[in-house]
Image (cartoon, rainbow, N blue to C red):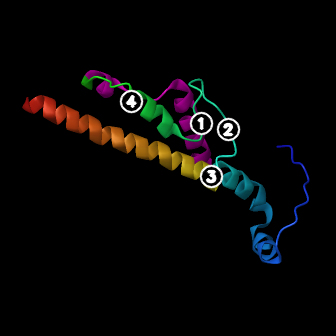
Amino acid sequence: MLMATITLEVPDEVARQLEDVGENLPGLLTYALDLAGLTRQKTSNNLDRQSPWNEVFAFLSGAPTVDEILDYKISDESQDRLEELLDLNREGDLTQQENDELDVFAEIDHMFILLKAYLRQNAAVS
């Protein structure tokens, strides 16, 4: 990865805190920029890539049928990103930001497991 050198003026207290961060500073800065919404990597749906929830919200806001919900799968792009994160996780090379991103995929998966189970159970009762 190419790295640029930058000079920052920060308060002394912040400088002391950053001394402990050391080599993790680039990852911390990337994570902070993402949290602040200052990075904008777009998906094909023109949604913020950092929030796979946007893909889910777009799907659900389209008022899908029960069958469409039961058949729902994340986009190929999201699936590719998930597989990339899982590979990094197996290798033990996840940054905190990537770990958080992987957690989002797990939350989405869990939500759909519960939603699909609910819909199947109610369909069986009807």
Q: Which mark is residue 35?
A: 3
Circle 1: element type: loop
Q: Which kind of residue does numbered mark 3 sit on?
A: Leu
Q: Which kind of residue does numbered mark 1 sit on?
A: Asp
Q: Is residue 36 left or right of residue 15?
A: left
Circle 3: element type: helix
Q: Which kind of residue does numbered mark 2 sit on?
A: Arg
Estimate how packed mark 2 is, as few (under 14), some (14 to 19) or many (20 or more) residues with alpha carbons within 10 Å: few
Q: Which residue is mark 2?
A: 40
- Mark 1 in CB contact with mark 2 (< 8 angstroms): yes
- Mark 2 in CB contact with mark 3 (< 8 angstroms): no
Q: Which mark is residue 61?
A: 4
- Chain-order first, disc 4 or disc 2: 2
Residue drawn at (69%, 46%), measured in percent from left and top? Answer: 38
Distance, label 4 to label 3, CA atoms, is 24 Å
Distance, label 1 to label 4, CA atoms, is 17 Å
Which residues fall within the magenta stretch?
67-93
Q: Which kind of residue does numbered mark 4 sit on?
A: Ser
Q: Which mark is residue 48?
A: 1
Residue drawn at (51%, 38%), measured in percent from left and top? Answer: 52
Residue 12 in magenta?
A: no
- Chain-order first, disc 1 or disc 2: 2
Distance, label 1 to label 3, CA atoms, is 12 Å
Q: Position of residue 6 (x, y in %)?
A: 90, 55
Can residue 90 be seen here? The reply is: yes
